[in-house]
Image (cartoon, rainbow, N blue to C red):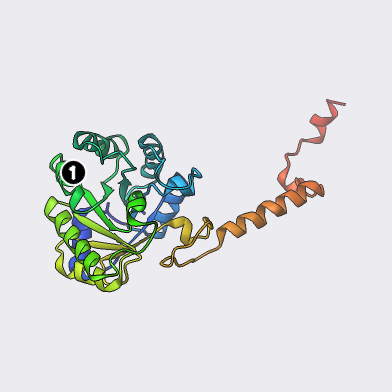
Amino acid sequence: MADRDKIDINYLYSKKAEGEKISWLTAYDYPMAKYEEEAGIEMILVGDSGGMTQLGYDSTLPVTMDEMTMMTKAVTRATETTFVVGDMPYMSYQPDRSEAIKNAGRFMGECGTDAVKLEGGRRMAPTVEAIVNAGIPVVGHIGMTPQSAALLGGYKSQGRDAETAKGLIADARALEDAGSFAILLEAVPTRVAKIIYEESQVPIYGIGAGKHVDGQLLIAHDILGLFELFKPRFVKRYAALGRDMVDAVARFKEEVKGGEFPDPEHSYGMPDEEYDKLV
């Protein structure tokens, strides 16, 4: 969208101050990112969820840095003004802080993102601080964190009792203190998200965290009906493009089988005088 300036962190903070919600979606390839920018989406997350929606993995855990950089480069080539966040995949930041800085730097330098996102609260705060100190903006991610699903007992809403809710509030404080410029809450009760939002000075975004946040993230394939293996409670479907694709491909097959395609409109002609030279 050439009619708007490049969105940056200052823009995101100004919208928080004004009370204007930020819209963001995932994208993993050039066409999706192009369409999202044309529609006016302000932020794009190149999520490790692309391992499931694009690469066919059963979870996000097998996704590699090389796969993430491939998808992220496609997205940044498609966008001019949208704020793009690269999602650090499993084991790209957990084992070693120097490796975390290196991989975060790949997103920024090699892929051209505006920031990176990583999962974890208090236990990951030192890593967040190290990455921020290296000059790389970080979005923290707490609540239902898919990379830690085994520790959380599966893909379940988090913070639904007082003890775990207090833990999430402490996680948010730790991430803000560590220098995260924004925090994403996933599958968190609305009341808990509201407490975190009211206590925080940085933008708080939600994916399944209710309306008392600074903006909403959803997975594009979920809202467009392009991923049907499961549907989280917080997903609202705005289209059924998967079914439309099946119908379109089926019509193509029928027309090929019936000899209807290609017709003259979709075939190339040749002047009669040139054809006469061949026969």
Taking the view exactly as shown, the residue that stands out farthest to the bottom is 191
On the image, numbered disc 1 is attached to which residue? Answer: 127
In this view of the protein, which residue sits in the foreground, 194 or 79?
194
In this view of the protein, which residue sits in the foreground, 40 or 102?
102
Q: Amino acid at mark 1?
A: Thr
Q: Residue at x 72, y 54 (%)?
A: 251
Residue 27 pos. (x, y %): 41, 50
Is 179 displayed left or right of 19 in the figure? left
In this view of the protein, which residue sits in the foreground, 127 or 13?
127
Q: Residue at x 17, y 49 (%)?
A: 125
Is 88 displayed left or right of 162 in the figure? right
Is 269 displayed left or right of 222 in the figure? right
Residue 126 pos. (x, y %): 15, 45
User: SS for tag 1?
Assistant: helix
Residue 236 appears in the figure: yes
User: In which quadrant of the rendered image does the C terminus lie?
Assistant: top right
User: In which quadrant of the rendered image does the N terminus lie?
Assistant: bottom left
Taking the view exactly as shown, the residue that stands out farthest to the right is 279
Residue 9 pos. (x, y %): 21, 54
Number of disc labels: 1
Q: Residue at x 45, y 67 (%)?
A: 236
- The image quarter containing residue 244 is bottom right
Residue 213 pos. (x, y %): 26, 68
